[in-house]
Image (cartoon, coloured by chain):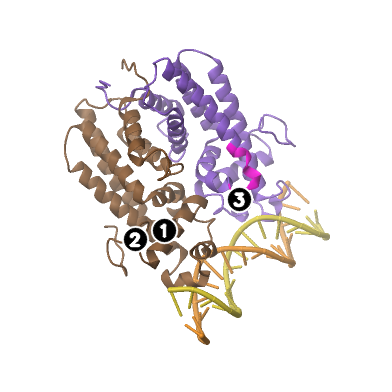
Chain colours: A purple, B brown, C orange, D yellow
Amino acid sequence: MVGRDAAEPPGASPESGSGRRAQLLSIAAELFARRGFAATTVREIAESAGILSGSLYHHFESKEAVVDEILRAYLDEQLAAFRKAVGQGGDPRSRLEGLIRASFTVLRRHRWAVAILHNESGYLASLERFAYLEQVNKEFERIWVRVLREGRSRGAFRAELNPRLTHRFIRDSISSVVRWYNPRGRMSAQTIAEQYIRIFCDGVVTTSSA
Amino acid sequence: MVGRDAAEPPGASPESGSGRRAQLLSIAAELFARRGFAATTVREIAESAGILSGSLYHHFESKEAVVDEILRAYLDEQLAAFRKAVGQGGDPRSRLEGLIRASFTVLRRHRWAVAILHNESGYLASLERFAYLEQVNKEFERIWVRVLREGRSRGAFRAELNPRLTHRFIRDSISSVVRWYNPRGRMSAQTIAEQYIRIFCDGVVTTSSA
DNA sequence: GTCTATACACAGATAGAC
DNA sequence: GTCTATCTGTGTATAGAC
């Protein structure tokens, strides 16, 4: 847990929960993801929710507090999903596939949070309030790099690939999916996940004589 | 050419050119890329350049005009580089590698522009002024998809991969590199390009029995 | 829980002196 | 080409009535 003092019943995620607060978080998350955090005004958030901007401050202490909550809910779930995935064992490839699938699974529920984190992490990192992002980032990297290194030392993954670079590569590729992913579109998160696994593991080229 | 009325000698790129105007563009580009377009103020740009905000308007008509110029300079060069790459012929894999290398080559000179386009395209697309971004986007996609489709029909690339998805995948992966790429760091753009080509084409796994 | 009304800061941009 | 001074709009946030 990244930690927060929940005034809401636990289990209520900002992007799927019921309740007014969760609804407001969901609306704000989509706007932040689509237009950017700085470019989104609290008036727009309130208007989308059918209330006036002043009323938002009954639910949240500030605009920053809103993103904060959106991001923490996502990060908590993602961390748990990664830990569960690597805990299941298996050969290196299965473990890598497990991490990739865990990313896509959480992405379905937290697409806006994934987009916000990907787009605004540079800006948010400059604010003291979001110093924890760097820590979580490092923890995620540790989990992935362990799997990649083990696979490499066992000869399952290519020796010439830098594990940290490979992790960033996969992470950013998946994060970028939220820009065009549509839950009601032709491609399900599963379909995309399987295509991505195919590319990451086996590449685009068929005659891999490497 | 995306087109603009140049009051400057041609060939002067915003990120490497000499002259006051080019210098200001370079400073602004870095700030926009690091902190976000909306989050960066004209006062910050001016301050970084050692002048006052009012003085900026002697060089540019507006903040939007500044990003506009940064993006156009990049897009012009990128388009030319892609066209040159596909014009060189070769087998599907060579052509794909050519496109990837062309991306990384241009990225060296226009890293901030690449970051801005990647991070802010959602927001910028909502402004009339930047309607051309969609057109350029489509043109880039056309170039890539042609190569990917041909490779697929020739049996060189996996049949199950969606060409448009594959293009977006590669494009976004490369764009994300600018977040951590450091021209004076351990990894050169070439080194990164070769690792990316390796992953894209052959995958991470060694025993690709696919 | 929402609205009214408003404080206060800061944004982008302009005009004219130097 | 830069500065001084400033206009005007809009942003976040607050206080108190309903």
Report the Cα–Cα distance between label 2 and label 1: 9 Å
Per the rendering, the mark at residue B17 is: 2
Q: Badge 1: how crowded within 10 Å, few (<14), some, or many (20+)?
A: many
Query: Which label lies toward us, 2 or 3?
Result: 2
Q: What element carries label 2?
A: loop
Q: What element carries label 3?
A: helix
Write down the quadrant of residue A197 in the picture: top left
Tell me how many marks there are.
Answer: 3
Residue visible at 63% across and 34% down in the picture: A73
Q: Are callouts 2 and 3 both on one chain?
A: no
Q: Are callouts 3 and 1 both on one chain?
A: no
Residue B110 percent location from the top left of the image? 36, 51
Q: In which quarter of the image is the C terminus of chain A?
A: top left
Q: Badge 2: how crowded within 10 Å, few (<14), some, or many (20+)?
A: some
For the residues bearing labels 2 and 1, Cβ distance under 8 angstroms? yes
Write down the quadrant of residue A18 in the picture: top right
Q: Which amino acid does label 3 sit on?
A: Ile
Q: Quadrant of the N terminus of chain A?
A: top right
Per the rendering, the mark at residue B26 is: 1
Magenta portion: prevailing SS class:
helix
Magenta stretch in the rendered image: A126-134
Report the Cα–Cα distance between label 2 and label 3: 41 Å
Per the rendering, the mark at residue A45 is: 3
Task: Decide if residue A15 is on the left or right side of residue B186.
Answer: right
User: In the rendered image, is residue A120 in sight?
Assistant: yes
